[in-house]
Amino acid sequence: MKTGLLPHPYRLRLACRLRQQLSLTKTGKPERVWMRTIDVNYKSPHYFLAVKGLSFLIMAGLSLTILILAFKLIARFRNSENIFLVCNLKLIRRLAFCTLIYYVLWWTITLVEVYFIKQSFSLEGCNIDLISTLELPNGLFEVPFTFIVYEVFSIGVKMREENQLTV
């Protein structure tokens, strides 16, 4: 056992299925089961735990910032006749970048955690599926969507400014 390493549980998705014989709780009969996920106790260094804790605090702050920015934006939309304003564009840009930073930080911590799992756990004939551990669908839709909304508002602000110059 290495010094400076602490065990932590983690649910892991496997690229292969493990066939094991387990007994059912209701009937008590042994039954063959194909496992797709398993709980793994892995060891990670103390510095990673500190970095992980700090990143979760940063992610909590980013979540709060995203929530506040979204409510500010909604309030500005309700209180103005024209939503294509530069101040709204700046809010949407901040919202998009906060969302991007949140998911990049989340994916980075998850990848490092999976690295430490690979160092302390292995099964013959099985690979750890990295893509499924990242939970990509969450951020793959939110991050591009916020940047698309930002670009739409950017075009709207430019069109509004051009319209004011021609009048």
Image (tube, grey):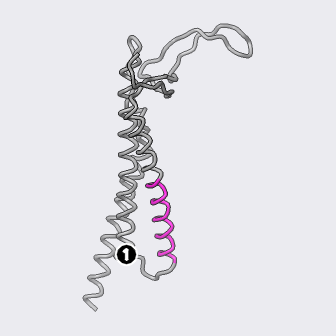
Q: Residues within 10 Å of mark 1 (few under 14, many from 20)?
A: few
- Tell me what residue is drawn at x 38 percent, y 29 percent: 45
The image shows residue 136, relative to residue 42, as above or below, that is: below
- Tell me what residue is drawn at x 37 percent, y 22 percent: 118
Left or right? Give the position of 24 relative to 70: right
Specify whether residue 70 is painted magenta. Answer: yes
Specify whether residue 163 is painted magenta. Answer: no
Q: How many marks?
A: 1
Task: Compare residues 3 and 158 and report the one nearer the observer.
Answer: 3
- The answer to which image quadrant residue 27 occupies is top right
- Tell me what residue is drawn at x 58 percent, y 8 percent: 21
Task: Compare residues 56 and 100 and report the one nearer the observer.
Answer: 56
Left or right? Give the position of 22 relative to 59: right
- The answer to which image quadrant residue 94 occupies is bottom left
Q: Which element is circle 1 on? A: helix
Q: Position of residue 137 (x, y in %)?
A: 43, 42
Query: Looking at the image, which residue sits at the far bottom?
Result: 167
Query: Looking at the image, which residue sits at the far right?
Result: 26
Query: Looking at the image, which residue sits at the far front?
Result: 3
Would you say the magenta stretch is mainly helix, strand or loop? helix
Q: Amino acid at mark 1?
A: Cys
- The answer to which image quadrant residue 158 occupies is bottom left
The image shows residue 22, relative to residue 151, as above or below, that is: above
Quadrant for the C terminus in the image? bottom left
Magenta segment, which residues?
Answer: 61-78
The image shows residue 19, relative to residue 86, as above or below, that is: above
Label 1 belongs to which residue? 87
Q: Position of residue 121 (x, y in %)?
A: 41, 18
Quadrant for the N terminus in the image? top left
